[in-house]
Image (cartoon, rainbow, N blue to C red):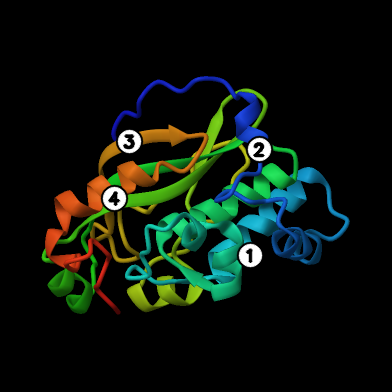
Amino acid sequence: MIDSPPLSPPVAQDLASDAVLNGANPLVMRQLSLVCGAGSRLECLERWYLFVRDAIRYDPFQINLRPEENAASRTLENQSGHCVHKSILLVAGFRALGVPSRLGLARVRNHLATESLERKLGTDVLTPHGYGAFWNGQRWVKCTPVFNRSLCEKFGTSTLDWDAENDVLFQPLDSVGQRFMEYIEDYGLFSSVPLDLIREQLLEMYPHAFDAEGNWSLKG
């Protein structure tokens, strides 16, 4: 992973529920209760991470820049989402569990992009790629809940498992030693979802993917 921008300690906003990171939404709270049960905080963090990773289907074309369409609760309703959606859901749940958390954004190169995805995007560069980060009491720990188990099996790579102490990001190699995912640029961690930055990145890299009204038009 390339060097990241300097990281500041947690602030009050890193525990807040807002319109997008809406961990206080009843749907999110109910799902947290179902997933986490009566476990310790660390057990709950792991269970929520695994739920978001495997129960929410990854869809790289599911992009909509309206705030309500990026809300954690909407991703639960859809049971699928873009990497940013899944990471927003992860962060919202972590905050609801009382753990300071932020959304991370980066530019990556997907060396195993499907032919359909690469043809429609016109490149194997994906931006912005979303991940999550939580404060473990001493430092920010980054984690990526994006590729579900069935998708990893299809691509011949292992899942990214939970680690409460060390960064867990995309595998640089697949199961036979070929390059899988490469981070090109890390935009840093955000206490709120920067929808303007996300739009700017999408327009810069995939201008052909927007219709005349400025809405994302590519479908899977």
Asked if disc 2 and disc 4 are in contact, CB closer than 8 Å, the reply is: no
Residue flagged by tag 1: what amino acid is it? Phe
Q: Position of residue 142 (x, y in %)?
A: 50, 40
Asked if disc 1 and disc 4 are in contact, CB closer than 8 Å, the reply is: no
Residue sitting at x 28%, y 78%: 219
* Left or right placement of residue 61 versus residue 143 in this view: left
Considering only vertical position in the picture, is 157 above or below 179? below
Query: Tag 3, which secondary structure?
Result: strand
Query: Tag 2, which secondary structure?
Result: loop
Residue flagged by tag 3: what amino acid is it? Tyr
Q: Which residue is mark 4?
A: 199
- Number of the front mark, 4 or 3: 4
- Badge count: 4
Q: Earlier in the sequence, mark 1 or mark 3?
A: 1
- Number of the front mark, 1 or 4: 4
Q: Earlier in the sequence, mark 4 or mark 3?
A: 3
Q: Position of residue 62 (x, y in %)?
A: 38, 70
Query: Tag 1, which secondary structure?
Result: helix
Residue flagged by tag 4: what amino acid is it? Arg
Asked if disc 1 and disc 2 are in contact, CB closer than 8 Å, the reply is: no
Q: Which residue is mark 2?
A: 16
Considering only vertical position in the picture, is 188 above or below 156? above
Residue sitting at x 60%, y 68%: 76
Query: Tag 4, which secondary structure?
Result: helix
- Cα–Cα gap, marks 1 and 2: 21 Å
For the residue pair 158 and 22, the one nearer the viewer reads as 22
Q: Position of residue 77 (x, y in %)?
A: 60, 73
Q: Earlier in the sequence, mark 2 or mark 4?
A: 2
- Number of the front mark, 1 or 3: 3
Question: Where the C terminus falls, by quadrant?
Answer: bottom left
Residue sitting at x 56%, y 20%: 9
